[in-house]
Image: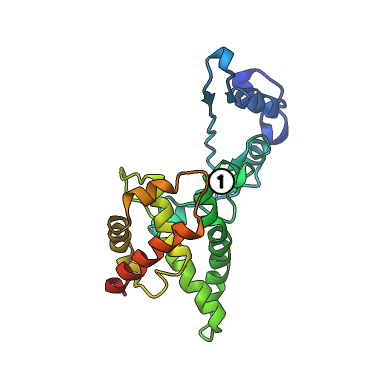
Amino acid sequence: MSLLLRRPPGCEAFPGDVFYLHSRLLERAAKRSDQTGAGSSTALPVIETQAGDVSAYIPTNVISITDGQICLETELFYRGIRPAINVGLSVSRVGSAAQLKAMKQVCGSSKLELAQYREVAAFAQFGSDLDAATQALLNRGARLTEVPKQPQYEPLPIEKQIVVIYAAVNGFCDRMPLDRISQYEKAILSTINPELQKSFLEKGGLTNERKMEPDASLKESTLPYL
């Protein structure tokens, strides 16, 4: 790369000013003012890591410039977890500020539970005597891992995503066999009032009154899948 750009080499033989080159490229992403036509431009740099090492020179360079990163893992992909996102390494500096209020409410605890599940699951393979709290964490984590799996070319509207995640986070799937969860997801979306689903997109989010109706529908539609 240094030879092609005719620049003196720096760390790991990359051009000495590669950080400046990356930042100059990525700063093109911006929100435009109304005077310049409005809208926004988002940059999504894609970096291939060596053996999944995100601490290498180029990944850390770009991570320090961007507003977060999504780390994908080959192992998760081959285990059928798609999108194969490593929850522990993936970070958003914008956080939940960009989420709808209802989505923020339902998935707030799921990120922590998934990270804990991945950590505990690695050690649980070597032990058979697990306490009740650990078993509950593994059970919930397996369901939370199963729920976001998405078939190719089948996008799900955000109001339906909220319903599905709400069911998983609130324990409606805890006693359900893993191979029935995808069927259950399709079933619950047809039982909850479409108007109620659309109301989740409002600024008020999930109020106590709005929670009562999906709770009743979810309890009823869960029974055939247990």
| Badge 1 element | loop
* Count of all numbered marks drawn on residues in the image: 1
Classify 123 as above or below 106.
below
Residue 193 position in % (x across, y down)? 32, 54
Name the residue type under label 1: Gln
Which of 218 and 224 lies nearest the eye of the viewer? 218
**Is 2 situated left or right of 137 in this image?**
right
Q: Which residue is mark 1?
A: 50
Identify which residue is drawn at 37% across, 44% down.
157
Classify 183 as above or below 100.
below
Residue 140 position in % (x across, y down)? 47, 70
**Is 125 situated left or right of 66 in this image?**
left
Which of 148 and 43 lies nearest the eye of the viewer? 148
Identify which residue is drawn at 34% across, 48% down.
195
Q: Quadrant of the N terminus?
A: top right
Identify which residue is drawn at 53% across, 76% down.
124
- Label 1 crowding class (10 Å Cα cut-off): few <14, some 14-19, many 20+? few
Residue 132 position in % (x across, y down)? 54, 83
Which of 82 and 150 lies nearest the eye of the viewer? 150
Query: In this rendering, does residue 156 appear at all?
Result: yes
Residue extending farthest bottom: 129
**Is 80 situated left or right of 31 in this image?**
left
